[in-house]
Structures are given as C-alpha cells and as structure tokens.
C-alpha cells in the first residue's frame, strides 16, 4: 500500500523518490494541476500519510494542494520540497506545512525526514501505523540538509530526534463520559512547546469570552484533547453557559487540586469539540477563596499537561488577571473601537510594561467594529500606541452562536466575525484552516 504522495513537476525528482520509496510512493505529475487542484486531488488513490509538494510548484498551487489534501485526508503531513530561499518565510506562513525539504538533500536525509515526520504523525494519532515496520524509514540517521519548520513541532529539526509529538489520544472519547474516573490519558506534551494564552481587556463586555472560546475551539481542531480553557473571570465567568455545559465543579476545586494531576483530570469538562473546560466558580463570593499564587500553580501544572492553555479573565488588572498574564506566553488584548476603551488599553499596556508582566507575544483584537461611529480602524493605533493585529466586525452571528451554545467558528464559519476570529486562531496556530470536515464535524455531532 502506498503511504507517501509526491506532487511535482520534476521528472528527475520523481524518479529519485521512486527509487527511494518504491511501492510506498504514489506520484501525481504537476501537469494535472492544469485541470484544477480538486481534480488533481481526486486522482489520489490511497490515503497518503505524507504529501511531498514540489519541486517546481508555485506558492498558490502548493497552498491550494495543502488545503485540499488536508480536507480529503485529515491529519496528512505536508512537506514542501523547495530550496531554502529568502521568500521561504512567506511559504511557511501561507502553506499549512510540516517541513521543508531541499530537493538537493541526500537520500539518507530525505528518508530520515520523512521517517521522522511519519513517526510523529503516528504518535500524534494523525496517521495509522505503516503496515510493516519496513515501511518506516530509519529515524536514527538524520542530517543537516533538511529543515523542519513546522511551527508546532520543535524547531530543532536538524537534530537526530524525531519531531515532538503534540497530541496522542490513547482512549476512546466514550471513556470521558464518567468524569469521576477518567480512563483517557492526555496527549504527552513533554518536550513540546506549550502556549499559555491569556485573554484580557481593561473593560468588561469587549469580547474576551468570545475570543477565548473560539480560540480553544480552533486550536482543538489541530490539537484535539490538548487544549484546556480556564474560565478565570472569577465572579461572572459565563463560559459554561456560552458552551451549554453543566458543571458542578470548576476553578475553585481545580486550584485546590493544583498539585495533583490525577485529580485535575477528574475536574475537566470535555467539550464536544475536543477541548477541556475548567468553569468559573459557581457563585461570585467563591472568587475570594481563590489564592492567585495557587491559580498560578494550576496554570503551570496545566501547561505540563496540555499543548494549549487558554485563559479567559476578569476585566481590568486584578490580582488574578495579573497572575494569568504573568504565566502566559501570549496575551490577547480585546478592545472595542471607542476612545474610552482604546485609552484604557493603552493604560493597561503601560502598567503591564511597568510591572514587567506584558506577555512575550501580544495580539491586539479590535472587536465589534462597525461603521459610522465617528472612529475608523486607523484611529486606534495612535491611541493605543500599537497597531491592532485583528479587526473583528460587529456581527449578529456572534450573538446567535452564543445563544445556540455553539462556538462561533463552528456555528457559522462564513460569518464575517467568525472569519476574523479564525485569523486570530491562525496567529497562534498557522495550520488551523477551516476545513470542511472540521466545520461539519460539530454539526454532525449535535
Ligand atoms: N464581534 C461581535 N459582534 C457582535 N456581538 C459581539 C461581538 N463580540 C462580542 N459580542 C457580544 O458582546 C457581548 C460581550 O461579549 P463577551 O461576553 O465575549 O465579552 P467579555 O469581554 O467576555 O465580557 P465580560 O467582561 O462581561 O466577561 C456578548 O453578548 C457577545 O455575544
Ligand atoms: Mg466574559
């Protein structure tokens, strides 16, 4: 059975790979792309674990192929075969790729890269294991002519280590039904770069919860069961409501359990879109019982268990929100396009800088933007002191999704706000494309 797919316009490279992978390789001459990418992809016979795209394909062709193959064959690994050139960064940004392979790489290096990616895909649960062990290239003899650039895989691609696994779900979802004794094991994230993303805003009602929920949803598409969403809006957190989840326990209990991974697992609520939620305390007065240091310890603990930790926060810069930001790698700052909110955000930034608590990565979201309000997007930068990274329009789709208890990006992916929120997800995880399967999966399971 073939395992790898090569789409290329170079007959020479095709011959070389055939010699290398023999029966494991199916090839699709780049000429088929003349009839359209979908036509070409329909010609792929068996489900490939890895697609090698290039050499001699354009950026557009490579991008469309990567998307179309990802839709037809979810989980597929994508390797772009291309020389390292100055525009490579654009390719990395635009193509949902896992690695770049030089066409000049030696046979050993080529085999090693594909073998390591294959192994990673199997470990991550994205590909079935090869039928025979002979099918997998020996991962032990990696070489430096390759560069593995997957933004989610550890960048030390040229070492002899296999790519770090980001997600391995070892038990069936049904096992999660009984929360008291979970039989599932979380994906092993040891050695994987974890991102802790705190969503903050100086004022209430700006869209923090909307961003946090959709971020968790989008990230879980690429890292199922490896995302946890913490509702740290301690007094009025409403994530459980927005997601239509029933919770009897939440952050208070999780903070108490910060030192006990097994206990924490029993407190996680699994959302149908493959992420976990730790809801806010059941009643506002319980907020006072949460010690910020212990909450910090919980965040750190969760960061050892999950690939992504997303934290919704209380408006303003209270102790708990500062703790969340202190422990975060990424801060998402949400503001509306009003002078008061923009100024407040500037003040928030000034304070965070003074305290040394501005997270390493910062993303400014201008939310609920509408026309004819007296301000335009360009007015935001001079007031905040930094340009907005994402502009989300005001849209009734946001409210409809919240009322339906379904994350916006799945409830109505074509909604203008949903598209903008998707670009926010992609700032954190560039391969989070809205594939048909991902969107419809939620619908089917309703
Ligand atoms: N882009 C948008 N278009 C239209 N409505 C929006 C948009 N973003 C958020 N909303 C709506 O605004 C309200 C507040 O949003 P959300 O709950 O996400 O904000 P928040 O910052 O978490 O608020 P709080 O401070 O109360 O926790 C919600 O009713 C939400 O549906
Ligand atoms: Mg909120």
Image (cartoon, rainbow, N blue to C red):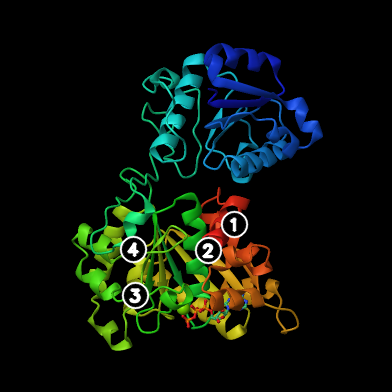
Kindly identify which numbered label has been placed on residue 247.
3
Q: Which is more N-terminal, label 1 or label 2?
A: 2
Circles 2 and 3 in contact, beta carbons < 8 Å: no
- Alpha carbon of mark 2 to alpha carbon of mark 1: how far? 29 Å
Q: Label 1: how many residues lie within 10 Å, few (<14), some (14-19) or many (20+)?
A: some
Question: Residue shown at 51%/21% (left/top)?
Answer: 110
Quadrant observed for ligand 1 in the rendered image: bottom right
Percent across and percent down for residue 39 are 75, 36
Residue to which mark 2 is pinned: 363
In this view of the protein, can residue 42 be seen by the observer? yes
- Alpha carbon of mark 4 to alpha carbon of mark 1: how far? 34 Å
Question: Residue shown at 63%/52% (left/top)?
Answer: 436
Confirm if mark 1 falls within 8 A of ligand 1.
no
Confirm if mark 2 falls within 8 A of ligand 1.
no
- Alpha carbon of mark 3 to alpha carbon of mark 1: how far? 26 Å
Which marked residue is nearer to the observer: mark 2 or mark 1?
A: 1
The local secondary structure at tag 1 comes to: helix
């Amino acid at each position: 059975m073939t395992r790898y797919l090569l789409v290329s316009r170079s007959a020479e490279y095709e011959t070389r790979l055939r010699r290398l992978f023999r029966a494991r390789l199916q090839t699709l001459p780049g000429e088929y792309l003349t009839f359209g990418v979908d036509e070409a992809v329909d010609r792929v016979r068996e489900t490939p674990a890895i697609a090698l795209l290039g050499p001699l394909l354009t950026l557009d062709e490579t991008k469309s192929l990567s998307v179309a193959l990802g839709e037809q064959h979810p989980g597929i690994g994508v390797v772009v075969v291309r020389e390292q050139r100055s525009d490579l960064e654009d390719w990395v940004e635009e193509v949902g790729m896992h690695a770049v392979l030089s066409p000049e790489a030696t046979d050993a290096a080529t085999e090693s890269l594909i073998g390591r990616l294959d192994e990673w895909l199997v470990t991550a649960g994205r590909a079935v294991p090869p039928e025979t062990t002979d099918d997998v290239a020996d991962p032990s003899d990696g070489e430096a002519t390759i560069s593995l650039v997957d933004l989610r895989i550890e960048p030390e691609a040229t070492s002899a280590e296999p790519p770090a696994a980001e997600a391995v779900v070892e038990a069936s979802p049904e096992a999660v039904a009984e929360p008291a004794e979970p039989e599932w094991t979380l994906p092993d994230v040891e050695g994987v770069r974890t991102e802790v993303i705190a969503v903050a805003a100086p004022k209430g009602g700006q869209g923090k919860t909307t961003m946090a929920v959709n971020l968790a949803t989008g990230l879980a598409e690429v890292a199922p069961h490896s995302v946890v969403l913490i509702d740290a809006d301690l007094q009025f957190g409403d994530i459980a409501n927005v997601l239509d989840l029933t919770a009897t326990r939440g952050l208070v209990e999780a903070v108490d359990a910060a030192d006990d991974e097994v206990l924490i697992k029993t407190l996680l609520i699994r959302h149908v879109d493959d992420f976990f939620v730790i809801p806010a305390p059941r009643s506002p007065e319980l907020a006072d019982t949460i010690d910020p240091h212990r909450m910090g310890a919980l965040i750190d603990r969760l960061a050892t268990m999950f690939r992504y930790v997303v934290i919704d926060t209380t408006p303003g810069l209270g102790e708990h929100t500062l703790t969340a930001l202190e422990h975060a790698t990424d801060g998402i700052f949400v503001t509306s396009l009003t002078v008061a909110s923009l100024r407040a955000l500037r003040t928030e930034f000034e304070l965070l800088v003074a305290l040394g608590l501005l997270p390493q990565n910062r993303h400014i979201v201008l939310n609920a933007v509408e026309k004819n309000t007296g301000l335009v997007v360009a007015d935001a930068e001079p007031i905040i002191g930094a340009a907005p990274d994402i502009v989300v329009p005001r849209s009734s789709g946001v409210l409809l999704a919240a009322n339906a208890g379904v994350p916006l990006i799945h409830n109505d992916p074509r909604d203008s706000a949903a598209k903008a929120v998707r670009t926010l997800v992609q700032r954190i995880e560039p391969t989070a494309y809205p594939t048909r399967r991902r969107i419809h999966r939620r619908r089917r399971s309703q």
